[in-house]
């Protein structure tokens, strides 16, 4: 069946409006104050892009078929896709997303993001595979009709490059995101898994993928395409496996960038301007965020891309370190010290997220302010397990935005602070990052909480270590008082003592 696609001058304008909405969304998401508005812009832009894409692919005639069956490249039958089927798929996806968003705990947000990245990568792989199997339907092939014999279908050279890059980046994103999800969710050890000769293996696989992509331009044989796909799945796995848990925030932002570039590559294959623009925005913003995160952790951006960072665990040293002398305090001690202070800086970490103590923490801050104490919150760029994790939790608890400060804006104030109240932030407060060259977190900028007159540190027990697997030197300082308990219960007891 022959059908034409309606072309309207309003289509480029609609995609332009969608692109502007995506830019405004990124701009809004750069600050907690404007994040809700940024989310709305993103949803509006996506709605415009989806509706425009559907409308422009409805045939001019009255038939409800959107994609008609066409002869596939390597045989088989490609069924028609109707408007009802697409709307049904959208409805199912929307229902899954809505239920997931409502039920997911804030502590599970990092692994949810990793799971979403894997779905974007898988979508790119499936679209590229569909385009390869049926290029005529995607308008990326020339059909040669010889006098004798079957029709010959030649995929356009530029489309072969776009298709191969899309499926390679998508496969790397999918398998890498699955490993990141398993590490973040606790299904897989957060410690680095260092394979012998991993750099040589990765470089060999990368060279093989690039070589096959170049060869695919001249030979569209199925074995070339599927070999690229398999090797890309494998290298995505190998790139993330050697990365330790302490570096997971960088991995999440890096995979975010990969998913964007995969979507952009598929946008070229589908001739969809909105996908190209959206993918480029996500890819570039993710790359910029990865660079910022690397600077925050003193990591090399190239080593992130190559999967060559993440150190050995320091678990052995941590076990012996617990015999060192340390001071233990109570909720009453903490309440008295903070009540007498002029300024208290609260440092939240993943332990706060696990205990869901953000609301109780805000209540404590309000009571301290009622006693005339100046309260501030210090956020490390990699506190938690994804960029902005602590900011989201504090915003959920309605902590005033003007009380929340990033590392570079507040680090100089710890020396003039009476009490630094650390709740579940381990690696990002470890002074060893500045002095111990053997530590896997050496060189990572940390919050200078040890410079405060008194450090109150909430921790479940002295036996555990941070996500990087190293003991925290801060526990054994003379000015540190350990508050060993569940974070939420301890803060609740402090609140009662303040009353």
Image (cartoon, rainbow, N blue to C red):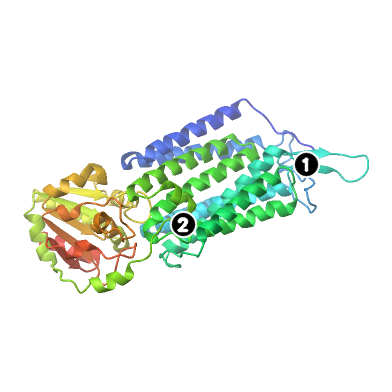
Q: Mark 1 points at which residue?
A: 154
**475 relative position to 8: left or right:** left
**Residue shown at 69% from the left, 49% from the top:** 130
Q: Return the x and y of residue 354 as percentages of the image width and height.
A: 32, 62
CB of mark 2 within 8 Å of CB of mark 1? no
Q: Is residue 252 above or below residue 334?
A: above
Quadrant of the drawing holding the N terminus: top right
**Residue shown at 62% from the left, 25% from the top:** 9
Image label count: 2
Quadrant of the drawing holding the C terminus: bottom left
Q: Return the x and y of residue 188 as percentages of the image width and height.
A: 45, 67
Marked residue nearer the N-terminal end (2 or 1): 2
Residue 106 vs residue 63, the one in the foreground: 106
Question: Can residue 312 be seen in the rendering of this structure?
Answer: yes
Query: Which mark's residue is nearer the viewer, 2 or 1?
Result: 1
Question: Can residue 82 be seen in the rendering of this structure?
Answer: no
Secondary structure found at label 1: strand
Secondary structure found at label 2: helix
Q: Return the x and y of residue 100 as percentages of the image width and height.
A: 46, 57
**96 relative position to 4: left or right:** left
Q: In this view, does 381 lie above or below 485?
A: above
**Residue shown at 29% from the left, 63% from the top:** 355
């Amino acid at each position: 069946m022959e059908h034409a696609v309606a072309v309207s001058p309003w289509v480029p304008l609609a995609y332009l409006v969608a692109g502007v909405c995506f830019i405004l969304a990124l701009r809004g998401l750069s600050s907690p104050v404007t994040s809700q508005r940024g989310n709305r812009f993103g949803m509006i832009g996506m709605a415009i892009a989806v509706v425009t894409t559907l409308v422009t692919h409805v045939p001019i005639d009255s038939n409800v078929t959107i994609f008609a069956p066409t002869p596939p490249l390597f045989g088989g039958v490609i069924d028609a896709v109707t408007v009802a089927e697409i709307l049904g798929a959208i409805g199912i996806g929307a229902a899954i997303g809505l239920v997931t968003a409502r039920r997911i705990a804030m502590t599970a947000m990092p692994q949810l993001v990793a799971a979403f990245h894997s779905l974007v990568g898988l979508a790119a792989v499936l679209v590229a595979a569909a385009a390869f199997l049926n290029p005529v339907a995607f308008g990326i092939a020339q059909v040669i009709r010889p006098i004798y014999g079957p029709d010959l279908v030649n995929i356009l050279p530029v489309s072969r490059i776009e298709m191969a890059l899309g499926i390679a980046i998508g496969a790397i994103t999918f398998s890498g995101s699955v490993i990141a999800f398993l590490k973040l969710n606790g299904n897989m050890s957060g410690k680095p898994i260092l394979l012998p000769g991993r750099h040589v293996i990765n470089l060999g696989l990368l060279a093989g993928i690039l070589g096959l992509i170049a060869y695919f331009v001249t030979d569209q044989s199925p074995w070339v395409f599927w070999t690229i796909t398999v090797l890309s799945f494998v290298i995505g796995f190998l790139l993330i496996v050697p990365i330790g848990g302490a570096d997971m925030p960088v991995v999440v932002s890096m995979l975010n960038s990969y998913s964007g570039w995969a979507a952009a590559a598929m946008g070229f294959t589908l001739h969809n301007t909105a996908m190209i623009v959206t993918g480029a925005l996500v890819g570039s913003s993710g790359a910029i965020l990865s660079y910022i995160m690397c600077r925050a952790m003193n990591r090399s951006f190239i080593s992130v891309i190559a999967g060559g960072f993440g150190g050995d665990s320091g678990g052995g040293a941590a076990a012996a370190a617990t015999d060192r002398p340390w001071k233990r305090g109570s909720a009453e001690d903490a309440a008295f010290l903070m009540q007498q202070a002029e300024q208290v800086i609260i440092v939240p970490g993943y332990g706060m997220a696990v205990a869901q103590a953000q609301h109780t923490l805000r209540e404590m801050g309000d009571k301290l302010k009622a006693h005339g104490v100046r309260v501030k919150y210090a956020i490390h760029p990699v506190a938690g397990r994804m960029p902005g994790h602590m900011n989201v939790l504090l915003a959920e608890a309605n902590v005033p935005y003007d009380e929340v400060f990033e590392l570079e804006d507040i680090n100089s104030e710890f020396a003039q602070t009476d009490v630094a109240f650390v709740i579940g932030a381990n690696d990002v407060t470890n002074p060893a990052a500045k002095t111990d060259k053997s530590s896997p977190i050496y060189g990572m900028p940390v919050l200078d909480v040890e410079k405060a007159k008194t450090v109150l540190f909430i921790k479940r027990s002295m036996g555990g270590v941070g996500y990087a697997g190293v003991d925290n030197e801060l526990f054994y300082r003379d000015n540190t008082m350990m508050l060993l308990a569940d974070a939420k219960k301890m803060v609740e007891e402090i609140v009662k003592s303040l009353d």
